[in-house]
Image (cartoon, grey):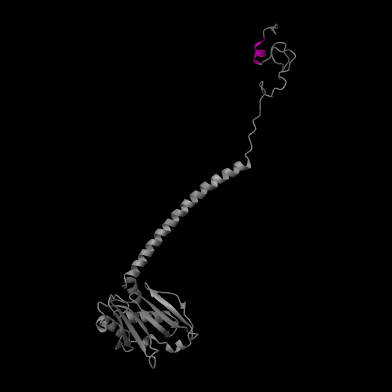
């Protein structure tokens, strides 16, 4: 339809209204409102409010899983580093302990703990047997302590001692790397109560002297002392206190019986 009205003023033109047009009426369409039927609000210039979409529960769960996974990965990495450090430290300690055990000789820690000053190499050398016996006697209950057995190895030892309150109760103690271990319960034995001894009843220096010449005394070819057991000989009348010095070699082995006075009784 041709426009027949007067030219619009600048204000009317800028306001989107033609002369003679009702407010809200579309230009050039007299009598028609400014919105066509079925037309969405705001299509012809009306503002549309933006509504932020709500985050669904599933979306929030996914975000939580991603964040938790990331934090879990970081935590796992930190834990892994800590465990690796622990493993390195444990390995270092284990190597040091293994070296101490595998060298089969007394080290500075052992010598200091026993108060030895003559560089004894084994627990059957020099003053070591007497020092080891005294260490057990001073550390285990009893004044003096009643022992059922004392075993001397190259650089560690065991002692089985009687309870001070229950005569049929015995406990075994270990000594290694200069430290006395805790009590390890043994089977109750009422008869063993008659076979105990005290450390002052044995000539420990005599044991050391025989051990130093054990290879010649035993005649074991290329022999070395493996261990010594001090206990009462329950197979002999009177159950005398003796020490058995064991010598091992590639072709044979033997043990030497030493009396409480330090003299050789027999070689087997």
Residue 9 sits in quarter: top right
Pinpoint residue 127: horizontal percent, then vertical percent.
30, 80
Residue 123 sits in quarter: bottom left
Residue 9 counted in the magenta span: yes
Seen from the viewer's position, the closer of residues 86 and 251 is: 251
Seen from the viewer's position, the closer of residues 53 and 13 is: 53
Seen from the viewer's position, the closer of residues 181 and 228 is: 228
Pinpoint residue 85: horizontal percent, then vertical percent.
42, 57
Q: How many marks?
A: 0
Pinpoint residue 57: horizontal percent, then vertical percent.
63, 42
Using residue 149 as the reference point, say whether residue 27 is left or right of it. Answer: right
Seen from the viewer's position, the closer of residues 143 and 163 is: 163
- The residue that appears at 54% across and 47% down in the rendered structure is 68
Tell me which segment is drawn in magenta.
8-14
Residue 203 sits in quarter: bottom left
- The residue that appears at 36% across and 67% down in the rendered structure is 98
Q: Quadrant of the N terminus?
A: top right
Q: Quadrant of the C terminus?
A: bottom left
Above/below status of 60 relative to 32: below
**SS assignment for the magenta stretch, majority:** helix
């Amino acid at each position: 339809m041709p426009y027949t009205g007067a030219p619009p003023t600048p204000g009317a033109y800028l306001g989107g209204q033609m002369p003679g047009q009702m407010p809200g009426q579309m230009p050039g369409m007299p009598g028609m409102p400014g919105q066509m039927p079925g037309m969405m609000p705001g299509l012809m210039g009306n503002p549309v409010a933006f509504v932020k979409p709500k985050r669904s529960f599933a979306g929030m769960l996914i975000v939580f899983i991603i964040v938790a996974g990331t934090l879990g990965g970081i935590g796992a990495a930190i834990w892994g580093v800590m465990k690796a450090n622990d493993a390195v430290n444990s390995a270092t300690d284990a190597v040091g302990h293994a070296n101490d055990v595998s060298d089969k000789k007394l080290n500075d820690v052992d010598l200091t703990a026993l108060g030895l000053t003559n560089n004894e190499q084994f627990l059957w050398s020099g003053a070591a047997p007497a020092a080891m016996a005294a260490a057990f006697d001073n550390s285990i209950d009893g004044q003096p302590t009643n022992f059922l057995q004392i075993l001397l190895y190259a650089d560690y030892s065991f002692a089985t001692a009687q309870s001070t309150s229950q005569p049929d109760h015995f406990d075994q103690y270990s000594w290694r790397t200069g430290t006395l271990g805790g009590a390890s319960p043994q089977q109750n034995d009422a008869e063993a109560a008659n076979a105990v001894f005290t450390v002052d009843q044995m000539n420990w220096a005599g044991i050391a002297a025989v051990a130093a010449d054990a290879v010649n005394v035993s005649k074991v070819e290329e022999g070395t002392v493996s261990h010594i057991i001090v206990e009462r000989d329950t197979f002999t009348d009177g159950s005398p206190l003796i020490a058995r010095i064991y010598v091992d070699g590639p072709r044979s082995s033997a043990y030497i019986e030493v009396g409480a006075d330090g003299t050789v009784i027999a070689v087997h």
